[in-house]
Image (spheres, grey):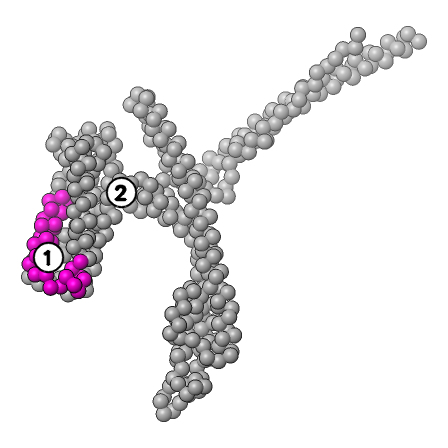
């Protein structure tokens, strides 16, 4: 009876391309956006328990953790309301229809709001004063600086006994009252994630944007120079200026003036205050109209592509981080550890090592499979040789 031999099938894992790590695009991580906005909720639960005395810990939770209690939510809601009221008052003060209102009324409302914000600022300083380093960290943070600058013009006005709104340098400080409106958004993770993704998208697209900017500057320089010489007309000694063919002073009196027209044209704004009169000037303008469409499309495509990539990576990473946090909550505290932060060089070296290890493993698998195949083939040859010898003896 002929003996059947089962040949093993070679199984490779090359179809699973996720085993190999590529170097073309590094996935964005939350570490990339560190420093963009200082995190005001940097204390975790374990660090919160280390804040002493107890009243300072409760004050921190009341001001910085809006979801910690009903009182904290009410404080957050009321402060958001007063911030919006302050912004509305600041805007209405500039409306001419409200100039007839007694200035003492505006001053009284401003004094009340500034006193409230001052108490809040001092309370936050107290809540962050568990150590000098944490206090300094909050005071120089984005929101800490905004809170200070939003009340500073009032005290300067009181000390100088003069309305600071008439001074431009202090009007800039008064603008920070409106910036306070964005402070409540720090508790909205979707808005913060969108800002972070936009920042990362621009940073990851900086090389493409620089190339586009260089091309725009080159087109701007060449086109404005051509338009200047095509539209400047002839020199009039009486008026001491260039005049066009209609005898009017030319609108393209200099290359910067022509550059303004080119910039308005390629950005598709088209104010219409400056228009070319000559055939040559209009001929030079035609390519600018087409280039304006490309100028809008190219950066939009680059930023849109990066935004979609970064958004997908960041949202996926947040989901994975949330799963890790959920697992950490079920594990003992002593077993929890923060993930190490690796540099780009360490990540690249780690990827190379993992790729080499995976390739070596697959080579060993292939080698063992080939050896088994060789043994099976040798057995098959032995059987065929035995059958051949048996037939020769029979004849």
Q: Residue at x 30, y 21 (%)?
A: 332
Which segment did they paint magenta? 92-121
Q: Residue at x 50, y 73 (%)?
A: 284
User: Relative to the observer, which residue lies in front, 188 or 228?
Assistant: 188
Viewer can see residue 159 = no
> Does dot 2 land on a helix, a strand or a loop?
helix
* Residue 247 counted in the magenta span: no
Q: Quadrant of the N terminus?
A: top right
> Does dot 1 land on a helix, a strand or a loop?
helix
Residue 98 vertical position relative to residue 277 in the rendered view, above or below: above
Q: CA distance from mark 1 to mark 2?
A: 29 Å
104 sits left or right of 233 in the view: left
Disc number placed over residue 186 in the picture, else none? 2
Q: How many marks?
A: 2
Q: Residue at x 22, y 43 (%)?
A: 137
User: Relative to the observer, which residue lies in front, 129 or 212?
Assistant: 212
Q: Quadrant of residue 371?
A: top right
| Image coordinates for residue 164, horizontal then vertical, percent | 13, 62
Q: Majority secondary structure of the magenta segment?
A: helix
Asked if the residues shown at circle 1 and circle 2 are in contact, with their CB atoms under 8 angstroms apart, the answer is no
Q: Which residue is mark 1?
A: 106
| Image coordinates for residue 224, horizontal then vertical, percent | 44, 73
| Image coordinates for residue 87, horizontal then vertical, percent | 19, 53
Instruction: Please state which of the two labelled residues, at mark 1 or mark 2, is closer to the viewer.
Output: 1
Give the farthest residue toward the bottom: 238
| Image coordinates for residue 338, horizontal then vertical, percent | 33, 31
Viewer can see residue 166 = yes
Query: Would you call the spot at circle 1 few (<14 residues within 10 Å), some (14-19), or many (20 or more)?
Result: some
Earlier-in-chain disc, 1 versus 2: 1
Residue 90 vertical position relative to residue 286 in the rendered view, above or below: above
Disc number placed over residue 46 in the picture, else none? none
């Amino acid at each position: 009876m002929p003996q059947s031999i089962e040949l093993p099938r070679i199984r490779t894992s090359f179809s699973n391309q996720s085993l190999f790590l590529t170097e073309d695009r590094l996935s964005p991580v939350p570490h990339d956006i560190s420093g963009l906005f200082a995190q005001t909720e940097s204390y975790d639960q374990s660090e919160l328990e280390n804040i002493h005395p107890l009243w300072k810990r409760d004050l921190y939770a009341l001001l910085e953790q809006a979801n910690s209690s009903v009182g904290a939510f009410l404080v957050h809601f009321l402060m958001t309301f007063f911030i919006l009221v302050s912004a509305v008052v600041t805007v209405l003060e500039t409306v001419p229809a409200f100039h007839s209102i007694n200035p003492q009324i505006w001053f009284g409302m401003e004094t009340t709001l500034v006193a409230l914000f001052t108490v809040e600022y001092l309370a936050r300083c107290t809540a962050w004063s568990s150590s000098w380093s944490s206090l300094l960290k909050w005071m120089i943070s984005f929101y800490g600086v905004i809170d200070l600058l939003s009340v500073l013009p009032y005290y300067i006005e009181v000390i100088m006994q003069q309305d600071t709104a008439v001074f431009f340098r202090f009007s800039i400080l008064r603008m920070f009252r409106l910036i306070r409106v964005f402070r409540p958004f720090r508790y909205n993770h979707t808005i913060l994630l969108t800002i972070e993704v936009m920042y990362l998208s621009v940073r990851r697209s900086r090389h493409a944007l620089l190339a586009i900017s260089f091309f725009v500057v080159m087109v701007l320089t060449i086109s404005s120079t051509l338009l200047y010489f095509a539209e400047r007309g002839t020199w009039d000694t009486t008026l001491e200026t260039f005049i066009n063919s209609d005898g009017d002073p030319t609108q393209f009196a200099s290359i910067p003036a022509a550059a303004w027209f080119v910039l308005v044209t390629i950005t598709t704004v088209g104010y219409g205050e400056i228009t070319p009169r000559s055939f040559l000037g209009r001929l030079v303008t035609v390519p600018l109209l087409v280039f304006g469409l490309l100028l809008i499309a190219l950066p939009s495509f680059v930023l849109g592509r990066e935004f979609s990539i970064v958004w997908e990576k960041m949202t996926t990473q947040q989901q994975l981080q949330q799963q890790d946090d959920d697992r950490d909550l079920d594990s003992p505290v002593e077993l929890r550890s923060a993930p190490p932060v690796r540099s780009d060089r360490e990540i690249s070296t780690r990827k190379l090592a993992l790729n080499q290890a995976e390739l070596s493993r697959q080579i060993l698998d292939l080698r063992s499979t080939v050896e088994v195949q060789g043994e099976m083939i040798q057995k098959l040859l032995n059987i065929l040789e035995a059958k051949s010898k048996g037939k020769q003896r029979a004849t």
